[in-house]
Image (cartoon, coloured by chain):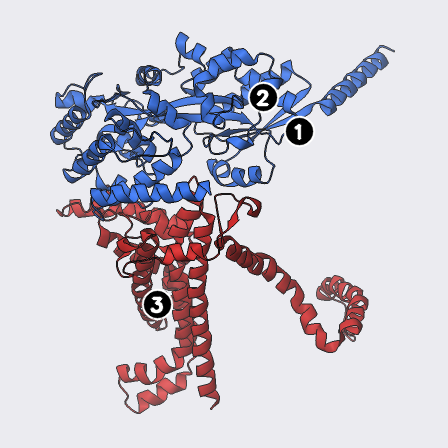
Chain colours: A red, B blue
Amino acid sequence: MSIVMGTGEGRAPGLSSWLAWPFRFLMGALNAPMSAVQRRFGIGGMGAVFLAPNMLIFGVFVLIPVVINLAYSLTGGTAIFFDGRYFVGLDQYKTLLTCGDYTIPSTCLQDAFWQSLHNTALFVVLQVTLLVLASLATALVLNREMRARGFWRGVFFFPVLLSPVVVGLIWKWILQRDGLLNALLLDLGFARTLWLAERNWAMFWAIFVSVWAHLGFYALILLAGLQAIPRDLYEAAMMDGTGRMRTFWRITLPLLWPNLLVVVILALIKAVQIFDEAFVLTGGGPGTSTMFITQYIYETGFAHVLRNLGLASAASILMGIVLVALTALQLLASNRRARKEAA
Amino acid sequence: MKRLTHLAIGALALAWSASVAQAATEVRIMWYSDGNEGEVLQDLVKRFESQNPDIKVVVDNVAFGVIKDQLPVQLEAGRGPDIVRVVELKSQARHWLDLRPHLKDAATFEKNFGNTLDWMREDGSNALPGFMTQLTITGPLVNTTLFEQAGVPVPGPKATWDEWAAAAKKVADSQKIPIALAFDRSGHRFMGPAISMGAKVIGPDGKPAVVDEGFKAMAQRIADWHKSGIMPREIWGGVAGTTYKGANEEFVNGQVAVYFSGSWQVAQFSQKIKDSFDWSAAPEPCGPAACTGMPGGAGLVAVKYTQNPKEVARVVEYLASEPVVREFSERTLFLPAHQGVAAKGVDFKSSDPNVKKSLDIFLNATQTADPLALKMQSYKWSGTIYAAVISRLGQVVAGETQLADAYARIEDDIKQKVAEASR
C-alpha cells in the first residue's frame, strides 16, 4: 500500500502547506509498516486490521464484562472474587423467577425484582409514548418559520446538556414539601401536595422529568428528518389543495418514519435502563412504586452490606436479554423498511 | 572563607535532610471526613512526623463512597492503604492487622478501647486492629425554642416513647409546623427504640431472631405515628430499599419538633442553625425494657496487607494516645471512644452553648447504652437485619404492605441472606 500525497505544485507554499507537513511526515512514516502488514494479511485482511483496535476496546470494555457478569450469575456467596464464590448453576435465575402469580409481585420470592419489573414496564410504555409524541410535536413546531427559532431550539435542547443527577436534584427541589411548586400553589390558595410521597404522583413526575430531560435530543433527530423532506412535495400538495392533516399523514409521517423508528427504539432502550435521574428524584419511592429494574440491581449487588452479586448479575443478564430483544426489533424494522424501499 | 564554611554547612544539612527524607518509611492513611476531622488529623500527623522523622505519614483524603465501594475490592485483592478510617468494621474484620505484637503497650491500648474492640475483630479473636476515632450514639434532638413557645415541657430522662410522641404532636399543632417527630430512615436508628421496647434481636443459637413482641411494639408505633401524621411519610415511605433519608434540612429550617437522629449531627447543626433557634439533644426515650440509643461510629484500623506493620503500629498508637484523642475530640466535637478520656470529660471547643449541652447528653448516653445495643455493633448480621427492617417497614409506611406481611418478609429476607453468606 502506498499513500500518495498532493504536492501542491505550481502554488506558493502557504501556511496550510506548512501545517500539512507533519501530517505528510506521519503518513510517510506509516507507509513502510502498513505495507508490511498488508503483505502479511493481504488486501482482504486489511479490513480486519483496521477494525482490530475498535474490537479490542469493545472486547475489553463490553464483551469480557458480559462474560464475567454471566459467570457471576452462576455463582453464589458474598465474596467479590471468584475464588471465594461457589457454583450454583441456574439457582439465581430460579430465585428471581419463582412466583405464585407473575402479575402480583408480592407472591414472588424476590418481590422487589418483580415490583421493579412491573414499574419499569409501566414507565417504558408511558414514557416512550409521551416522549415520542412530545418530541414529534416539538420538532414540528421548531421546523416552522418563526422568530428566534435558534433560541427556541436551544431552550428545548438545554436540558439534554444537564447531568441526570442535576436534573433529578433540580426537580426534587421543585417538588419537595417546601419546594417551588408547593410554594406557588400555597400562594394561589391551593393545598400543599406531597408530590414525591404519593404513589401515582411520584410515577407521574418520574415520567415527566424524564421526558423533559430527553425531549430535546429526540426532537433534534426528528427535526433533522423533517428538514430532509423535499420542500417541493409540500408545495405540490399545497397546489393540489391538500389539507394540513392529510399532508401530515401522507407526506410528513411516511418520510419521517425512519427517524421516528430510530427515536422509538433509542427511547425504549434508554427507558429500560432508567436509573440516575429517577433515583435522585424519588429514590425508588414511595415504598417501591418508582423502583426500576436498574435500582433493584444496584440495591441487590452494591447497597447491602452482604453484596448479592450473583442475584444482581442474574437480574442484569435478564435485563440484557430484554435490551438485545429491543435492538433486534430495531434491526428487523429497519431491514424490513430497507427491503420495502429497495423493492 | 567564612562564606565557604556556611555554604559547606548548608550543603551538608541539605544532604542530611534529604537522606533522612529518603530513609523515612511511608505510611498511608485512607481517610474520609464528615466535618473538620481531616484538618485536625493533618495537624496531629505533622506533630507525629516531627517527633518521628523516620516515618512519613501520607493522608489520602477520599470521599466516603471510596471507602464504601472501592476499599472492599482493594481489600479482597489483598491490597489497600496501610491504615484506613472505616465504618464497616466487623464485616471486613478479616482484612485488619493485629497490632498486638507491634504495640509498645498493648495492655493500655486494650484497656482504653476495650469495650469497642469487638466491633472491629472477628468473633472469638482478641486482636487489636485499631481504635474508634469517634463514638456516635443515636438519640433525640429537640427544637427547644418551639417547645418553649408552645409551653410544652421537654420530656425528661425517664419519659416513654409515647410521651415523647404526644409532646412532639402538641408542639407541632401549637406551632403549626409540618413535622412533629422525624426519624432517620435507617434500620440502625430503629433498633435502639426497638431494644427499648424489649426486642431481643439475637436468638439463643446466635442467629438473628428479629421479630418478637418488643420489635412489633416499636414497629406498630412507627406505623401508627405515620398514619396519625406525627411522623412525615416522605422520609420513611419516600424512598425504596435501604436508601437512607434524613430530616436534617427540615430540622435546620425549624420545621421539626423532635428529630431522632444522633450525635454526629451536632457539629453541622451548630454550623447551620447558628442563633436561629435553640436546640439540644435530649435523654434517650424509654420503653419497658430500656432507655437506649444505638452506638456506632468510625474506626481507624491497620490493614494486614501493609509492608510496614511496625511503623503502622507506631502511628496508630500515637493517634490512640490519651492527649491526642482528647485534642481530636475537643476540636472535631466527636465523642471519644477512649474510656479514660470519656471518664474525665471533654472540653468541646465550641462557643455554641447548644453544642456543649448536647454532646454532654450524648456522651452520657454512650455510657448507659443497653448491652444488647452495644453487642449489635459487633454482631455479624446486624447490617443484614437493618437492611431488611428498613426496606420492609418503609413499604408499610408507604401503604404497600401490612405489618404482618412485613414481619414475614423481614424474617425471609434475613434467612435468605444468612443462608447465602453461610454456604
Residue furthest to the front in view is: B205
Image side of residue B266 versus residue A21, left or right: left
Task: Determine the chain carrying the residue at label 3.
Answer: A
- Labelled pair 2, 3 in contact (Cβ < 8 Å): no
* Amino acid bearing label 1: Gln
Q: Earlier in the sequence, mark 1 or mark 2?
A: 2
* Amino acid bearing label 3: Ser
Q: Are marks 2 and 3 on the same chain?
A: no
Task: Determine the chain carrying the residue at label 2.
Answer: B
Label 1 or label 2, whichever lies nearer to me, is 2
Give me the disc on residue B99.
2
SS type, badge 1: loop
Q: Can you say whether B225 is above or below A300 in the image?
A: above
Between marks 2 and 3, how big is the CA–CA gap? 63 Å
- Labelled pair 3, 1 in contact (Cβ < 8 Å): no
Q: Which residue is mark 3?
A: A135
**Residue in front for this viewpoint, B74 or A131:** B74
Q: Can you say whether A274 is above or below B41 in the image?
A: below
SS type, badge 3: helix
- Labelled pair 1, 2 in contact (Cβ < 8 Å): no
In x, y percent, where is residue A30? Answer: 77, 65
* Amino acid bearing label 2: Leu
Q: Would residue A98 be seen by someone viewing this image from the given angle?
A: yes
Between marks 1 and 2, how big is the CA–CA gap? 13 Å
In x, y percent, where is residue B208? Answer: 35, 34
Q: Would residue B394 be seen by someone viewing this image from the given angle?
A: no
Give me the disc on residue B307.
1
